[in-house]
Amino acid sequence: MSGTDRPPVALVTGGGGDIGRAIALRLARMSAAVAIVDRDEAAARATAQLVEQGGARALAIRADVSLAQDTIAFVDAVETRLGPIGIFANNAGIEGIVAPLHEYPDDTFDRVLQVNVKGVFLGLKHVLARMMQRGTGAIINTASTSAIRGRAGLAGYVASKHAVLGLTRTAALDVARTRIRVNAVLPGPIESRMIRDLEGQAREGGIALRRSNATAHGRPQDVANVVAFLASDEAAHVNGAAWVVDGGTTLA
Ligand SMILES: NC(=O)c1ccc[n+]([C@@H]2O[C@H](COP(=O)([O-])OP(=O)(O)OC[C@H]3O[C@@H](n4cnc5c(N)ncnc54)[C@H](O)[C@@H]3O)[C@@H](O)[C@H]2O)c1
C-alpha cells in the first residue's frame, strides 16, 4: 500500500452487525472493494448492498469465523474473487450472557471464547499467511474496553477480549520486521444491538455493568473512523496498539 494508492481489498468479519457495517462503509471510502463475512447471510448482503451504493465493489460471504474450514474458505474466496486483502477488520464477536461468575454457564463460556478468541486467531492466522507473502497489510482486531478492565457479570466476554489484546500484541511482534501492522480497537459501550442486549440482561439480573457516570454511548461510526485511521498509511508507525474509543469513560 503506498500513500496514494487505494488499497485494493478490505475484509470485514461480523460485517452484518452494527459496528462491522459502519467499518465496511467507512473502508469502502478508501478501498476499491470490500468483502463482508458474517454468519448471518442476509445481514452481510444488506451491508454489501450499502457498500455498492457507495460506489465500491462488495462481496458478501456467509461463514462462521470460529471454524477453520470456513475461515480458510472465505480468505481464499476473497483473494480469488476480489484480489489481495490489504485491510482486515477482524471484528466478529458475541457477548454471551450476563451472570455472576459462580453461576456463569460453562457452555456459554466455551462458545464466547470459541468465537471471540479462536475466531480472531483463525482470521489472523489465515490472513497473515497471505499478507506475509506480500510483506504488507493492516489488520485491526475489534477488542473492547473489556480488554483492559473487569466488568461484573461478563466472565466469558471479558476473558475473551483480554485474549484478543494478547493475540494483537503477539501478532504485532511476529510481523514487526515487515510492513504489516496489527492493532486493536477498544470500543466502550456503543449504541448497538449488542449493548442494548447486555444492558437489558444486566437490568433484569440487577447487575451494574458500568462503573462510570457517563451516560452517552459512542456511535458505530466513531469506531469505524479509528479503524480507518489504523488501516491507513497515516498510522504507518502504529503497531500493536490498543486504541481506546470510549469518550474517556474507561478513565472513570
Ligand atoms: N456494541 C458495543 O458496545 C461494543 C463495545 C465494544 C466492543 N464491541 C465489539 O465489536 C464487535 C462488533 O459488535 P457489534 O456491536 O457490531 O455487535 P453485533 O451483534 O451487532 O454484530 C456482530 C456481528 O458478528 C456476527 N457474528 C457473530 N458470531 C459470528 C461467527 N461465529 N461467525 C461469523 N459472524 C459472526 C453476527 O452475526 C453479527 O452480525 C464485536 O467484536 C464486539 O465484541 C462492541
Image (cartoon, helix red, strand yellow):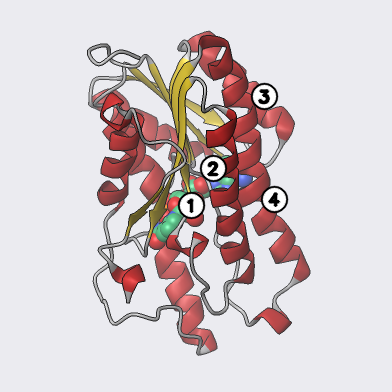
Q: Observer-nearest residue: 184 or 49? A: 184
For the residues labelled 2 and 1, say whether their Cβ atoms are less than 8 Å apart.
yes
| Ligand 1 within 8 angstroms of badge 4 C-beta | yes
Q: Amino acid at mark 1?
A: Ala
- The residue identified by callout 1 is 143
Q: Amino acid at mark 3?
A: Ile
- The residue identified by callout 4 is 114
Left or right of 92 on screen, residue 217: left
Q: Amino acid at mark 4?
A: Gln
Q: Nearer the viewer, mark 4 or mark 1?
A: 1
Q: Nearer the viewer, mark 2 or mark 1?
A: 2
Q: Amino acid at mark 2?
A: Thr
- The residue identified by callout 2 is 168
Q: Observer-nearest residue: 134 or 225? A: 134
Query: Which tag, 3 or 4, sits closer to the chain's start?
Result: 3
- The residue identified by callout 3 is 72
Left or right of 227 on screen, residue 162: right
Estimate the spatial distance between the alpha carbons at disc 3 and disc 2, rounded to whole Å: 20 Å
**Residue at left 54%, top 79%?**
152
Query: Which tag, 3 or 2, sits closer to the chain's start?
Result: 3
Query: Which tag, 3 or 1, sits closer to the chain's start?
Result: 3
Q: Quadrant of the C terminus?
A: bottom left
Label placed on residue 238: none
| Ligand 1 within 8 angstroms of badge 3 C-beta | no
For the residues labelled 2 and 4, say whether their Cβ atoms are less than 8 Å apart.
no
